Structures are given as structure tokens and as C-alpha cells.
Image (cartoon, rainbow, N blue to C red):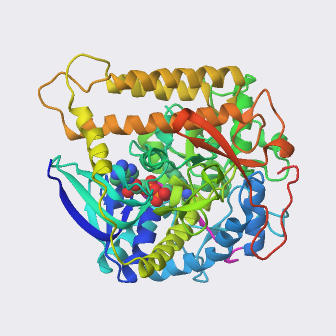
Amino acid sequence: MNIEKRRFDSLIIGAGGAGLRASLALSQSEARVAVVSKVFPTRSHTVAAQGGVNAALGNVTEDSWHWHMYDTVKGSDYLGDQDAIEYMCRTAPKVVVELEHYGVPFSRMDNGKIYQRPFGGQSRNFGGAQASRTCAAADRTGHAILHTLYQQNIQAKTHFFDEYFAIDLIKDDEGAILGAVVLNIATGEPLIIEAKTTLLATGGAGQIFRTTTNAHINTGDGMAMALRAGAPLQDMEFFQFHPTGIAGKGMLITEGARGEGGYLVNCDGERFMERYAPNAKDLASRDVVSRAIAIEVRDGRGCGPDKDHVMLKLDHLGEAVIKKRLPGIRDSCLTFKNLDPVSTPIPVYPTAHYTMGGIPTNRYGEVVVPERHGPEEPMIGLYAAGESACVSVHGGNRLGGNSLLDILVFGRASGHKVTDYLKENRHHRPLAQDSVDQAFERLLRWDKKGEGENVYDLKAELKKTMEEHCGVFRREDELAAGFEKVCVLEERLQDAVLSDHSKVFNTARIEAMELENLMDVALATVKSALERQESRGAHSRIDYPERDDKSWLKHSLYFKEGKTLDFKPVTLKPLSVETFPPKPRVY
Ligand SMILES: Cc1cc2nc3c(=O)[nH]c(=O)nc-3n(C[C@H](O)[C@H](O)[C@H](O)COP(=O)(O)OP(=O)(O)OC[C@H]3O[C@@H](n4cnc5c(N)ncnc54)[C@H](O)[C@@H]3O)c2cc1C
């Protein structure tokens, strides 16, 4: 088939905060940039981010990037790479001020400075009193950032392919990535986008779980594309369960609600976090709070007729504070639970939230392939940033407010790195037709109609399996059974069909391809969780309850071929300061 081709210097797949920050850096440097997004850019999931972005501005409490670095290393349960963490925390004030100058309408204090709220895991002076480090635009920070970045990109003349679905990367025999085959969702026409560099910024994969804060679009497409291109996925066993999802629904109640003074109670009205984290209490790290809620419910101290959730109290904050600082939270409660937090506590339970693992990159956004295939080297032409990548700054557990920071810092850094690459690599490599054909095959496969299992049922089964076998608490036998089940689901998907109706809609074909991607990401997650025989950060093994630095202070790397794992060391050496050596992690 003769497929239309377009050529750009650089292709960015994903128009969330990471993709748009990278494209802005590139467009401003005069590169010809194409941004492909399966939804209109300002509907990317960054728009949903509520609480804010961390930067040691010191507007509310005294602060320093070094304290921020300490909190992030500790929050990561010492699995984060300390060079990348230092870089992120040092760069944070600069990217936030840059955003302010681009026009992000941050909330203000009376003195005109950017408002900063306290978030979980933040401290002053290396573990001392609570810090206030999270820069907020009410509880709609992601919305403000994404819209501003989009407007800046329009001004910089970034070329957008809105509502195009990236099917697969194009790769030549030397392993260089040459762009991607994409699908125009409205017309069903495929398109080849040739580029000297390709950046994956496709966000997280919360859709592998049934109850999640993530939108339907968060299907880990970039992670699966990277796997198919031969890259591994790093640290996939670390999936963050946010403590305060609306019970039974999953929608997020931002940590900012506890930052503003909200707190959790069990059925006895007890502020139970005082038992689990005597100092930080409700603002302990997310993994700690999620486990505490799960234990309260397990031990019969849950609320409601089924005793299956706890309560988040905001009613003591007063109407004025809730309306000014948490208006979106109030809306969500009214819409999804028909309750007003001004007067009624919110029923909450942990919900799947954030993919700490992802495509392994260095701090310039280059995708690095580990030693198993020779010395660790960047893949030619392939970059990744944002939630789809693993730099790794979050390690075993991400701190609230550090993800918006990650997408901005490393989106920007990868944009700059690509700019340098383009200066040295002026020509396109010849297109690899075999690779194009292979990508196209993925699409054609879903034109098949007739009898067979239904894609939607398989998706529901996958999400249920992951929730039951790979949740907040994990155990060897359950993980092993979960892995087997997902392997069987993967096989069943080979024979599945869309429908036996005469017309197959593009949205249905896309959902099927997304399910293939989810399957790969789920396999990586459950297999990595099965292999890691310790408890660290969000990975909590009932059968191995302790952290084991002797055997497990290392990153896992999952490869699609053979569904096998490899490991690589954690970078404990920062760029300019002393290492924070692993210590027991208490809040
Ligand atoms: C409800 C919620 C609240 C949050 N609040 C905060 C917060 O307060 N602070 C914080 O630091 N973090 C927060 N986070 C986390 C943070 O928002 C995300 O980690 C971050 O925004 C991810 O940005 P991204 O650019 O990596 O991906 P996204 O914003 O998810 O963008 C992904 C992009 O990839 C595109 N895409 C994906 N697959 C394809 C494909 N196959 N073809 C074409 N395009 C594709 C999508 O269309 C989209 O444009 C929150 C997360 C959630 C879910």
C-alpha cells in the first residue's frame, strides 16, 4: 500500500506536559517539530493534575533544593538515581519561574509571591519540620500548565497532528529509530512520519488496573512501543496507589486536601495516621498512607456498611478555604458522590495512580539500553520523557508534586539534547520499509471480523486480574498466578475479534491496539513484582516485608523477548554533593 509520508526534524509522540515542554524547546530552536496526540493536546492527562508542582522557592517556609533532593531520595526508598534527582531539584525553581513567565496563573499570596502548599514527604533541613514546597494554581495546576504550554507552542509554530494514534516506531537494521507509523483517527488513513529523532511522551499506564485515577487514554502505548523496538522497561514493579481516591470510583482527591489541613479517620473517628507516622501523620509519603488505609480496612476499622473505606475530613477547614484552594475537589465530590466536603467527610480508598517505572533514560532523555546488549548506550534517535520514562527520579515511590516537575525538567532537557543531536545529524536515514510494513500489519490485524472473543471482555479481565494479583500488598503465589493469567490473556487476545458487524470503527481498532499495549505493560509489571523479593516503596511484599539493600538495591529491567528480567545498579553518586546513603525510612 502506498502510504502518505511527512518529514520533520523531530517527532514527539504525546502532547502532555512532557511532550509540550520538549516541543517548545525544539520549536524555539527553529527545528521542524511534529507533535502527535491521540486526543486534542489540552485533553492530555496532565490537564487533570490537581495539587501542584514542587520547587524550593522558599515563599512560604525556608527551603533549599538540597532539602528537596533529600526528601526525594528518601521518598524513593533510595532506589532513585541521585545524579538525576540532584539535577531535577536544582532545576526546579528555574522551570517554575519560566512557566510563570510563559503565563501560568499560579495562586498568589498576599505579598504577590507564588503560593506553595505543604505536600506529603516534604521536610526542612533534611528530615525536620514540614516544608511548603508545592506551587499551586488552586487545585487545577495541571490544567493551567498544559494550556499555557499549548499556547506557547502555537506561538512557536509547532506542527500538531491532533487525534492521530501512533501505531508503532519505525526502526532500521542498525537499530536507529526513524519516526513512526500513525493513524488519522477521524479518517482511518495511515501516515508515515519520518524524523531524525523521536521522543516518546505518552504518559502512564494506570489503565492496567480496574480502579484508577487515570483516564481511559493512559494505556502505556509508548512503553509498549519501546518494548517492541527492543528497549526494556525499568522498575515496573513500582506502581503508586494514591491513598485518597473516591471510594468505589477511583477519582483523585489531591494530597493538597491534606496539605490544606484535611485528615483521615477510621470508623471510630480516630486519626489513625498518628499511629503509622507519628511525625508526618497524614502527610507521610503516599506508600505509607496507602498501606495504613488498607490495614485499617483489613482489620475491621473501615467505615460504611461494608467497612471498606476510611473518611477524609475537610469540614473543619471552612467553606472559604475549600472554595478558594480546593474548588475542583468540591466539584468532584458533588458530581461523583453527591456530597459537599464543606459539611460532609469524603469516603476514600487507595487507587492506582502513577507508573514509577518506564522506558529507561539518562537525564538528557536518551533511551539507554543496558549492558546485556553490550555497554550501556543510547538508542539512536530515540528519546523518552515524562510518566512513560524512568530517569529514575522517583525510584520506589514518587512524592506528590514531583511528577509535574519531572515532565517539565526532563521534557525541557530532552528538547535541548535533541537540538544538539540535530546540529550534528543533518540528514534523514533511508526509510526501513520492512519496519513500516510491520507497523501497518498491527493495524490490518484488527480489520478481522467474525467469531471470536471480545476485546472489551478481555480488557475487563486484565484489569481485574491486575487488581487482584498485583495491588497494594503482594505475595509470591498470588503474583505467580497473576503472571500466568496475564500470559493466557495475551494468548487469547491473538484470536480475539472486534465484532461481526459490517463496519469496524477506528476507535474500536485503536482500543484493540491499546489493549495489546496494556497486555505488554501488565506483563512487565507483574513479572517484575514477582521477581523482586523485598518490600521497598510502593512494592509491598507480605512474604518479604523488609527492604533488602544487600540484594535488591538495583533497578529491574524487563525485556519483551522471553519475558525476562535483568538488573542494573542504582546511581548513588549525585553530581556535586555527598551521597545520601540508604537509611531506615521513617516519617
Ligand atoms: C488525577 C491526577 C492528578 C495528578 N496531580 C498531580 C499533581 O498535582 N502534581 C504532580 O506532580 N503530578 C500529578 N499527577 C501526575 C501527573 O499529572 C502526570 O504524571 C503527568 O501529567 C504526566 O504527563 P505526561 O506528559 O508524561 O503524560 P500525559 O499528560 O498523560 O500525556 C500523554 C500524551 O500522550 C498521548 N498519547 C499516548 N499514547 C499515544 C499514542 N499511541 N498515539 C498518540 N498519542 C498518544 C496522549 O494523547 C497525550 O497527549 C496527577 C495525575 C493524575 C492522574
Q: Nearer the viewer, residue 36 or 8?
A: 8
Specify whether residue 347 is in view. Answer: no
Seen at 50% across and 68% down, the residue is 411
Q: Nearer the viewer, residue 112 or 156?
A: 156
List x then y, in percent, for residue 383: 48, 62
List x then y, in percent, for residue 222: 44, 50
Is 487 left or right of 237, judged from the image as shown?
left
Q: Residue furthest top?
A: 451
List x then y, in percent, for residue 400: 63, 56
Main SS class of the magenta portion in the image: loop
Region in magenta = 47-60
| Up-down relation of residue 219 to residue 6 (above or below) | above
Is 386 left or right of 567, judged from the image as shown?
left
Q: Nearer the viewer, residue 391 or 377?
A: 377
Q: Nearer the viewer, residue 15 or 318?
A: 15
Q: How many marks?
A: 0
Q: Residue furthest left?
A: 502
List x then y, in percent, for residue 144: 44, 67
Seen at 68% across and 75% down, the residue is 90
When asked about the image quadrant of residue 574, the answer is: bottom right
| Up-down relation of residue 565 to residue 113 (above or below) | above
Q: Is residue 541 magenta?
A: no
Specify whether residue 578 is in view. Answer: yes
Is 575 left or right of 387, judged from the image as shown?
right
Seen at 64% across and 58% down, the residue is 375
